[in-house]
Amino acid sequence: MEVNFFFYLSEKSTFSGTQDEPGNYIDFGRLPAQSGTFITIMNITIEDIKKYGSVLIWCEPFKVVFTYASLEHVK
């Protein structure tokens, strides 16, 4: 079964519900499975990552944020 979830790094830090858009984001590609352990290589500098507020899982068939985690940047 093909997994239609994608891993995004978004400039938004919170999402209000399923109708919320991901905002400006970097697409790190399709998740290889619905469960298990896997690695995603993020080719981004520390300075660049500071403008992003969350990581999220995007469900493409329904065009919704499936889940997200806000990022807290250490100074």
Image (cartoon, rainbow, N blue to C red):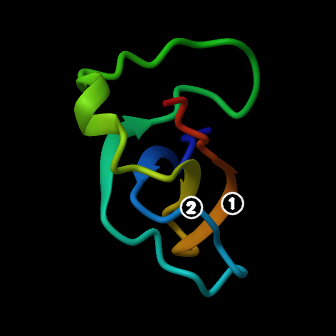
- Name the residue located 70 percent from the left edge and 81 percent from the top edge: 16
Point out the residue furthest to the front here: 75
- Figure check: 34 above or below 13: above
Figure quadrant of residue 48: top left
The residue type indicated by label 1 comes to: Phe
Residue at 42% in and 46% down: 9
In the rendered structure, which amino acid carries the disc numbered 2? Ser
The image quadrant where one finds the N terminus is top right
Q: Return the x and y of residue 57 as percentages of the image width and height.
A: 59, 50
Where residue 45 sits, quadrant-wise, is: top left
Mark 2 neighbour class, 10 Å CA radius: few under 14, some 14 to 19, many 20 or more: some
User: Relative to the observer, which residue lies in front, 1 or 16?
Assistant: 16
The percent position of residue 65, horizontal first and vertical second, equals 61, 66
Q: Is residue 41 above or below residue 44?
A: above
- Specify whether 75 is left or right of 26: right
Q: Which mark is residue 66?
A: 1
